[in-house]
């Protein structure tokens, strides 16, 4: 029997800029240190959100796309720096698409052993109509998914 602690060799952390995402990065960082894991930080630029913003202001659509890309790059770099405080390196990906679909695709392409993501709650009719990214990832993922609340990871 192998007694290695390297259960999770490849961890994917989808981030959206919320406090839940930051908590997920911190928890995933701790796990990555224990398991000597490769870490990938992923941000998906939601094409539906992008399309809606462009629909309201067609003249500035290209500017909107550029701004969303720059914000996304800044976000993943911030999360990467958070992991570097633990002495960890991370690979970052920013991609456009439908968030849950991209997360699942990337997890398969990267042979991910664990997805660590923040919980982002929706209430009322919005939840009924749209569901949540986390729910869809949990439902269709082929690997374990660790869902993190922001209060679970306050700095001590």
Image (cartoon, rainbow, N blue to C red):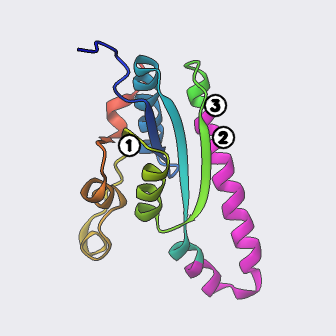
Secondary structure of the residue carrying tag 2 is helix
- Mark sitting earlier along the chain (1/2): 2
Q: Which residue is mark 3?
A: 81
Residue at 67%, 55% in the rendered image: 71
- Mark sitting earlier along the chain (3/1): 3
Q: Residue furthest front?
A: 1
Picture layout, residue 34 above or below residue 65: above
Q: Does 14 sit left or right of 140 as displayed?
A: right
Image location (x, y in percent) of residue 123: 27, 64
Picture layout, residue 61 above or below residue 26: below
Q: Which residue is mark 2?
A: 77
Secondary structure of the residue carrying tag 3 is helix
The magenta span reads: 51-80
Q: Which residue is mark 1?
A: 115
Residue placed most toward the observer, 120 or 108: 108
Q: Does 63 sit left or right of 104 as displayed?
A: right
Secondary structure of the residue carrying tag 1 is strand
- Callout 2 environment at 10 Å: few (<14), some (14 to 19), or many (20+)? some
Q: Quadrant of residue 8?
A: top left
Give the tally of numbered discs: 3
Contact between marks 2 and 3 (CB within 8 A): the answer is yes
Q: Main secondary structure of the magenta part?
A: helix
- Callout 3 environment at 10 Å: few (<14), some (14 to 19), or many (20+)? some
Residue at 33%, 35% in the rendered image: 151
The quarter in which the C terminus is drawn is top left
Residue 59 forms part of the magenta stretch: yes
Image location (x, y in percent) of residue 155: 43, 23
Q: Does 17 sit left or right of 84 as displayed?
A: left
Spatial CA span between label 2 and label 3: 6 Å
């Amino acid at each position: 029997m192998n007694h290695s602690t390297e259960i999770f060799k490849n961890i994917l952390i989808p981030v959206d800029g919320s406090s839940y995402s930051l908590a997920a990065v911190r928890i995933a960082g701790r796990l990555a240190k224990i398991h000597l894991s490769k870490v990938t930080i992923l941000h998906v630029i939601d094409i539906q959100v992008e399309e809606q913003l462009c629909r309201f202001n067609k003249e500035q659509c290209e500017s909107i796309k550029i701004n969303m890309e720059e914000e996304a790059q800044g976000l993943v770099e911030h999360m990467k720096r958070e992991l570097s405080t633990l002495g960890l390196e991370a690979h970052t990906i920013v991609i456009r698409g439908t968030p849950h679909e991209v997360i699942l695709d990337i997890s398969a392409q990267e042979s991910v052993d664990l997805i660590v993501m923040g919980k982002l709650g929706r209430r009322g009719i919005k939840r009924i109509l749209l569901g949540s990214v986390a729910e869809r990832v949990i439902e269709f993922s082929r690997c374990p998914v660790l869902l993190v609340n922001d209060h679970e990871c306050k700095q001590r």
